[in-house]
C-alpha cells in the first residue's frame, strides 16, 4: 500500500508519500516561519490562509517526487488534531476531498501519534514497548508506548511546554521567533555555571513537568538594572541547561518506573543537540538506548503522519466522509491498532 499524507496543524504545510515496501518516496514542506516572525509567534488566521495557498502545489510536488499518480495510492492520511482549528481544517478538507475524488479511503491522524511514530522512519527503528519523551512547542509528555495506538501518558507539563519555555525565554533575550534553535545557538557561546536557573519539579517525585517558573527567573535576571547584555549567552546556556537537565532526569525516571530500556525522543525540541547528547550519555550509563528521528522529522512534517496513516489503513481503519478537525484531542483516547476506528 502507498499513502499520501497531509500535515497542516500549525505553521508547516507538508505532504509526503510513503510506500509499504519501498519506504518514504517523497516529503515536501513549506515552513511559514518567515510569515509569522514579525509578529513574534504564529498568527492562526495567517497560518490557515497560507496553508490554503501552499497545500495543493505541495501535493503535486510530493506525487511528482514520488513518481506516483493518484492511481498508485491506497489511501490519504491527514492530521485531524490537536492543533490550530483553522489550520487543521485546511488540510482536513483537502485530504478528505482528494480521497473522495480519487475514490480512496481516508484516515484521520492524531498529530502527536505522528510525532511518536516518526522514529519508525529510521533504518534501525525502536521496538515496542518503549518510553517516549515527546517535547514540542505545544506538548511535553512522557508516554509508555506499548504498540501503535497504545499510549499511556506517564506525565506531562502542568503549564508551559519545553518548546514554549525555549521560545519565551528566547524572546526575553531579544531573539527572533522561533526562539528554540536561536537560543541553542547563543548558548554555544555561553559559559557554564554563570546562571543557575531552577530545574522545575526535579525535587519532587513523579513524572510531571512545569516550565513557567523558568520564564520568571530569566525575566528577573535580564531585567535587573545591572544586567550586562554581554551575558546574554550565559543566560541562554543556563536556560538550556535547566530545560535539558530536567528532561533528562525525568526521562530516566520514566525508564526506571516502567522497567523499560528503550527511550524514544520526538517533537521539535528533540532537535536540540545538547538534549540529544546528554540523554544518550545518561541512558547509556543505565544500559538503555535512545532513538531519535532525524532532525527534519523532529519538527512538524507529513512523513510522520504517513507512518501513522499507513499503519492504520493497513489495519482496516477508515475515516468517514466528515471533514474531521479537532483542536483538542487527548492522546490516550486513541484505540490500539487492531481495533477498528478511533475512540473519540
Ligand atoms: O514539534 P514542533 O515542530 O511543533 C509543535 O508541534 O509544537 O516543535 C516546535 C518547537 C518550538 O518551540 C521550537 O522552538 C522548538 O520546537 N525547537 C527547539 C529546537 N528546534 C526546534 N528547541 C530547542 N532547540 C532546538 N534546536
Ligand atoms: Zn508538532
Image: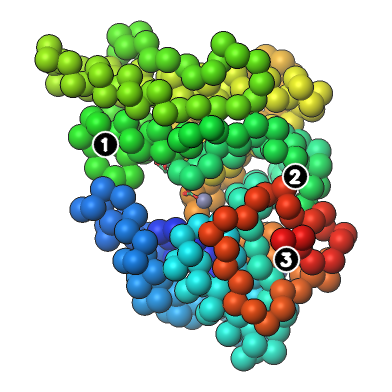
Please report the residue visible at 44 percent of the width from the left and 19 percent of the height from the top: 242
Residue at 33%, 23% in the rendered image? 216
- Is residue 51 something one can see in this rendering? yes
| In this view, 298 is above or below 278 | below
Extreme right residue here?
338
**Mark 2 or mark 1: whose residue is earlier in sequence:** 2
Q: Measure the alpha-carbon separation of dots 3 and 2.
A: 18 Å
Q: Which mark is residue 310?
A: 3
Give x and y (percent) for residue 271: 48, 39
- Residue 151's disc is 2
Is there CB contact under 8 Å for labels 2 and 1?
no
Q: Are marks 1 and 3 in contact (CB under 8 Å)?
A: no
Q: Is disc 3 surrounded by few (<14), some (14 to 19) or many (20+) residues within 10 Å? A: many
Q: Which residue is mark 1?
A: 171
- Please indicate whether residue 344 sits to the left or right of residue 147 in the image: left
Q: Nearer the viewer, residue 159 or 141?
A: 159
Q: Image quarter for residue 34?
A: bottom left
Amino acid at each position: 500500500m502507498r499513502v499520501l499524507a497531509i500535515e497542516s496543524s500549525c505553521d508547516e504545510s507538508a505532504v509526503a508519500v510513503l510506500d509499504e515496501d519501498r519506504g518514504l518516496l517523497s516529503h515536501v514542506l513549506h515552513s511559514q516561519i518567515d510569515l509569522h516572525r514579525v509578529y513574534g509567534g504564529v498568527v492562526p488566521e495567517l497560518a490557515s490562509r497560507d496553508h490554503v495557498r501552499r497545500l495543493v502545489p505541495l501535493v503535486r510536488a510530493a506525487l511528482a517526487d514520488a513518481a506516483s499518480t493518484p492511481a498508485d495510492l491506497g489511501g490519504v492520511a491527514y492530521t485531524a488534531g490537536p492543533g490550530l482549528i483553522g489550520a487543521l481544517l485546511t488540510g482536513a478538507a483537502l485530504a478528505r476531498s482528494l480521497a473522495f475524488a480519487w475514490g480512496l479511503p481516508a484516515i484521520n491522524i492524531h498529530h502527536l501519534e505522528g510525532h511518536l511514530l516518526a522514529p519508525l522512519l529510521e533504518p534501525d527503528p525502536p521496538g515496542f514497548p518503549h518510553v517516549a519523551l515527546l517535547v514540542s512547542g505545544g506538548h511535553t509528555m512522557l508516554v509508555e508506548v506499548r504498540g501503535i495506538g497504545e499510549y499511556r501518558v506517564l506525565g506531562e507539563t502542568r503549564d508551559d511546554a519545553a518548546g514554549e519555555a525555549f521560545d519565551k525565554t528566547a524572546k526575553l533575550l531579544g531573539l527572533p521567533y522561533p526562539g528554540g534553535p536561536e537560543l541553542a545557538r547563543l548558548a554555544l557561546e555561553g559559559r557554564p555555571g554563570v546562571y543557575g536557573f531552577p530545574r522545575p519539579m526535579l525535587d519532587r517525585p513523579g513524572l510531571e513537568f512545569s516550565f513557567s517558573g523558568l520564564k520568571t527567573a530569566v525575566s528577573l535576571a535580564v531585567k535587573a538594572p545591572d544586567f550586562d547584555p554581554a551575558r546574554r549567552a550565559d543566560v541562554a546556556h543556563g536556560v538550556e541547561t535547566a530545560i535539558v537537565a530536567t528532561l533528562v532526569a525525568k526521562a530516566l525516571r520514566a525508564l526506571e518506573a516502567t522497567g523499560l530500556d528503550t527511550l524514544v525522543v520526538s517533537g521539535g525540541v528533540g532537535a536540540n543537540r545538547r538534549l540529544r547528547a546528554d540523554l544518550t550519555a545518561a541512558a547509556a550509563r543505565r544500559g538503555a538506548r535512545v532513538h531519535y528521528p532525524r532532525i527534519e522529522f523532529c519538527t512538524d512534517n507529513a512523513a510522520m503522519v504517513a507512518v501513522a496513516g499507513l499503519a492504520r489503513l493497513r489495519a482496516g481503519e477508515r475515516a468517514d466522509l466528515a471533514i474531521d478537525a479537532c483542536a483538542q484531542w487527548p492522546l490516550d483516547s486513541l484505540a490500539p491498532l487492531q481495533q477498528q476506528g478511533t475512540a473519540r
